[in-house]
Amino acid sequence: MHTHASQLQQARAQLAPVAGDLAALEARLLAQAAWGVSAETLVRHADDVREDDALQMLVNRRLQHEPVAQILGYKEFWKDQFIVSRDVLTPRADSEVVIETLLRHRGDKNTPLRVLDLGTGSGCLLLSALREYPQAMGVGADQSPTALEIAAKNAAALGLQNRCALLQSDWCSNARGTFDVVLSNPPYIPTADIAALDADVRLHEPHAALDGGADGLDCYRSILQQITPHLASVALLIFEVGQGQDEDLVTLGKAHGLRHVETAADLAGIARVVAFEYEI
């Protein structure tokens, strides 16, 4: 006889090798999805008997290193839930530093900002920014049509489809007009490092969203070469960077006429975001 509690305990034990300290959390999230119940229900009905294999099926997927977010079909980011798939990079908590940095440098939330998000993926950066700035409009650009489909679903789910446009574009190449804010979390993993990434990432996330070229900086170079005609007379640019890349990006930005205004660290104390100002 298998109860909710006993199945959860078994799932935790099975997940430990792939999830480590997160095994209990992942087991609970997968159980909620498998059984269509809330966390509260799991606690209150821990002794209820359940004889189906719905949870085990999801655990088996996780044991193949499929990320929990892809199994669930969503990931929490900033203040909302975002639809994800294997066609987009799963939003990370580290990327929330981009939004925090934006809020520090553009304190008036009623400013009618024009925001450009380059490599928008799920749309999490652009849509989180639009949620914080109710008068803002935005464009999310991505090369991948499947990524843009996910971003469109997220925009609709958040009621933001009328304040953003989604554009298939190689960085800025198809963008029109000028923007007050540019956000980007481009691919920044050096090509040679991809083989050593965790299997969760290496096997299940799009390599096009990871591979930043030989030194991880190719995408920043491309963006900086294209971006100036798309900047308003005063503009803020905020980039997420990989560990140890912040000083190189500051050098690149300055070479393109940008003024470095901040490097912000993530919760682990790693320099994660570089912000520039542009002014004519």
Image (spheres, grey):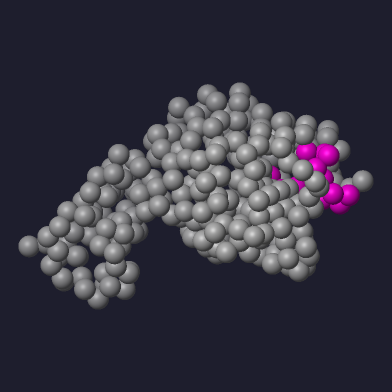
Residue 221 position (above or below residue 3): above
Tally the marks.
0
Q: Is residue 158 above or below residue 204?
A: below
Residue 22 versus residue 210: which sits nearer the camera? 210
Which quarter of the rendering shows the N terminus? bottom left
In the image: residue 41, left or right of residue 100? left
Dominant secondary structure (helix, strand or loop) of the stretch shown in magenta: strand
Q: Residue 18 or 114: which is nearer the viewer? A: 114
Residue at the spot 78% in from the left edge and 63% down from the top edge: 112
Q: Residue at x 73, y 41 (%)?
A: 175
Instruction: From this view, report whether residue 39 is shown above or below residue 180.
Output: below
Nearer to us in this view, 38 or 198 = 38
Looking at the picture, how far across and down is residue 117, in whole percent?
67, 47
Which residue is drawn at the image coordinates 71% and 31% (left, top)?
Answer: 222
Residue interval drawn in magenta: 227-239
| x, y percent for residue 90 | 49, 47
Quadrant for residue 267, please give it. bottom right
170 or 261: nearer the eye?
A: 170
Q: Residue at x 35, y 49 (%)?
A: 71
Q: Residue furthest left?
A: 1
Residue extending furthest front? 162
Work out whether residue 97 can be spotted. Answer: no
- Magenta-drawn stretch contains 273: no
The reply, left or right, for residue 167 in relation to residue 69 is right
Q: From the top left corner, tell me how far across and down residue 9 is, in percent.
A: 21, 59
**Which residue reaches farthest right?**
280
Residue 235: say if magenta.
yes
Is 105 left or right of 240, judged from the image as shown?
A: right
Can residue 58 be spotted in the picture? yes
| Residue 261 coordinates in the image, percent (x, y) | 80, 50
Query: Which of the 4 quarters of the picture holds residue 156?
Result: bottom right
